[in-house]
Image: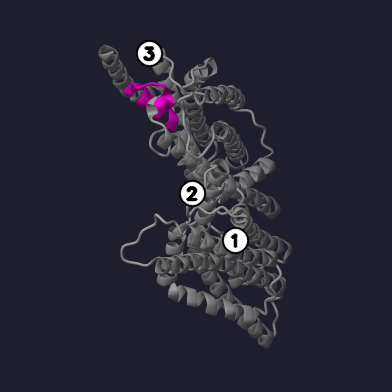
Amino acid sequence: MYVIPDTLIRLTQVFCTSELKELVVTLSSLVEQCKTKIIQGTGFVVASFILILNLCLVLFAIWEDDLNSFGNPNFKLTFFTEKALILVYIIGDAASFSMIMYAYLFVTTFGVVILNVYEQLMEEFDVNYLRGDFSIESKEIAWSLHKSLDEFTKQLFALKRVMDIYSKIGSIYILALIYHSAVNLFRLLNAISNKNEVSFLINSMALNVYCVVSLVYIAYFGNHLSQRAQEIKENILAANVLAETLSHGKISKLLSWLPTWDWKLSAFEMCAVNHTIIPTLVILFLFLCISSDVLTSNSLEVVLQSSKLSDHITFALVYSMYVIPDTLIRLTQGFCTSELKELVVTLSSLVEQCKTKIIQGTGFVVVSFILILNLSFILYEVSEDDSHGFANPNFKLTYFNHKLLTVIYVFLDATSYTAIMNAYLFVTTFGVIILNVYEQLVKKLGVIYLRGDFETESKAVAWSQSKWLDGCTKQLFALRRVMDIYSKVGGIYILAIIYHSAVNLFRLLNSISNQNDVALLVNSKALNIFSVVSLGFIAYFGNFLSKRSQEIKQNILATHVLARPLRHDEISKLLCWILTWDFKLSAFDMCDVTHAIIPTVISSIFPCMILIFQLRLSENEEI
C-alpha cells in the first residue's frame, strides 16, 4: 500500500516529465484563450481536498502508531539507532502519502478543467460554425470566418493532445489510487474480523472513513467524466441535425472527427473507471483475502476432509469453475464497456427502424431462462454445501470468523453464478435478435432493391429509391458493427460457458466413479442435469446461428439469380459485401461452436478422468 502506489506515481513523473509540462502549458493557454469558467465538476475538486485533509489525519495516526511500535523493548537494530529509524519511517510515510495526495489533485483538478474547456469549445462550435452562414458573398466576412475556423481547429487539436496526455498519465495514477484504496479496504475487513492488534497495522477512524469513501469517490468521478463527455458528443450531434445543410468541407470533417473522441478514465487501460469498479474490486479482494486465510490456516486435507491426491486435484479443477469463467466475464465487461453500450444502443435503433418481429430462435431464449432457473437451484445447493463444509471442527481461521467466511463464500458463489447467467442471456438473446434483424434487412434488400427498377425516368421515383437504398446501406453497416461486437464479446462469454460446462461434466463423471463424498464438492440432481444439458444447448445454439446465417446468404443469392440483371453499382457492391459475412459463434476464435464442440469437450475431459481414476485405484490399493 505504501510502496507500489508511490513507485508507480514517481516513475510516471520521471518518465513523463516533458508530457506533464506540455499538459500544463497547453491547458493554461486553452483556458486563457477560451476564458473558461469552471462550472462542471467543482464538487469533485472540493471532495478531493477533503480526502487530502483526511489523509493528513491518517498520516499523523500512522506516525503515532510507528512511534509506539518501535518502542518495543525486544526491538533490536545493528547499524542504525532507533531515533534515526523512526525519522526515516516518518519521512517515508510522508513521501508515500504526499504522492497519493498529488495523484488525487492531478486526476480531479485537470480532469475537471479539461471537461469544462471541452464543453465550452463544443458550445462555441455549435453557435459560431454549425449555425453560422458560410455562404456570405462578402470576401472580408468570409475570410474572417475562415480565419476564426482555423484558430478553432488548432484549439481542438491542442485539446485532443491534452486529453491524450491526461488519459495516459491519469490512468497510471488511477491504478495507484485504486490499489491504495483496495488494500486499505482489505485492512479494514481484516481489522473487523481480527480481535488481536498487530504492530504496524493501524486501525483509526480517519483511515476507516477513507477506505469507504475513496473507492466510491474514484468510481463516481470516473463515471461523471465519461457521462459528461458522452453528453457533450450527443449535444453536438443533435445540434448538427438541427442545423442547416453544411456546405463547408472543414466543418464536415470536424463533425466526422469529433464523435470519434472517447475520453474516459481507465486504470492503465485494464478497465474503465465507473460504478462497476466498486463491486469488481470488492469481489476480487474478498476472494483473495478469504482464500489466502483458508489455505494458510489449514491444509487441503483439513479443508476437504480427505488426504487423497485425486480428491485434491478434483477440488482444484472444480474450484477453477468458479474463478476462471467469472474472471473472464467480468474482465470483458470492464474492457468492453463502451462497446457493450454501443451494441445495445445500435441494436435497439435497428429493431425500432426495421420494426423487427422476433420469430426465429425464441425457443433458445426460453431454454436459456430455464437453464438460469436451474442455476438458481444449483446456487442454493452450493451455498448450503459450503455452510456444511466449513462446519468442520478441525477447520481454523486466522483473520476471519466462520460466520463471516460462510457469508462471503455464499456471496462469491452468487457473483460467480450470476456472471454465468448473464453470459447465457447475452449470448442467446442478442444472438437471436441480431439474426432476426439480419434476416429482415436481407429480405428488404431482396424485395425492394434486387427486384426494383432503378432505370425509371421519373426523377422523383429515382430520388426516393436512392434515398431508401442509402437508408438500407446505413442499417447494414450498423448491423455489421453490431455483429462484430457480438462476436468479440460473445466469443469470450462462450469460452467461459464452455469451460464451466466442461468442468461440470468432469465433476459429474468424477462423482459417478467416486463412492466417497468430498467436502465442498456438491453433488446434486439439478447440477447433474445442468452438466448434461448446458453443453448440448450451447452446441445446438451455435449450430443454429451459423446454419441460419448461411441460409440467409443463400436466399439472397437465389433472389439475385432470379432477379433481373443489375445495373446499379451500389446494389452490386452491397450484395458482394453481404455474401462475405460469416456470422457464427466461436470460443474466442479458437474453435467454432457447432455440434462438433460436444465430442471435442468430451475428448478433452477423458484424459483428466483417466488420470484421476488411476490415482484413485493406486490410493485404494495403498489403503
Name the quarter where the C terminus is drawn. top left
The image shows residue 482 at horizontal and vertical percentages of 55, 44
Count neighbours of disc 1 (C-alpha within 10 A) and say few if under 14, some if 14 to 19, many if 20 or more: some
Query: Which residue occupies the extreme front position in the image?
Result: 73
Q: Residue at x 61, y 37 (%)?
A: 437
Secondary structure type for disc 1? helix
**Residue highlighted by disc 1:** 259
Disc on the earlier residue, 2 or 3: 2
Tell which of 492 and 18 is nearer to you. 18
**Residue 130 position within the rendered picture, expressed as x and y whole percent measured from the top left:** 69, 70
Let me know if residue 283 is in the magenta part.
Answer: no
Q: Which is nearer the eye, 160 or 529?
A: 529
Residue highlighted by disc 3: 513
Helix, strand or loop for disc 3: helix
Secondary structure under tag 2 reads loop
Amino acid type, residue under disc 2 in the picture: Val
Q: Reply yes or no: does residue 315 show up in magenta.
A: yes
Q: CA distance from mark 3 to mark 1?
A: 59 Å
> Which is more toward the observer, 233 or 526?
526
Binning the other alpha carbons within 10 Å of mark 3 as few (below 14), some (14 to 19) or many (20 upward) gives few
- Going from the N terminus, do you reach mark 3 or mark 1 first? 1
Q: Residue at x 53, y 52 (%)?
A: 184
- Highlighted magenta segment, given as a residue range: 302-320
Q: Residue furthest bottom?
A: 140
Which of these two is toward me, 83 or 589? 83
Tell me if residue 531 comes above or below residue 500 in the rendering: above
Which residue is denoted by mark 2 in the rendering?
A: 198
Disc 1 marks a residue whose amino acid type is Pro
Q: Amino acid at mark 3?
A: Ser
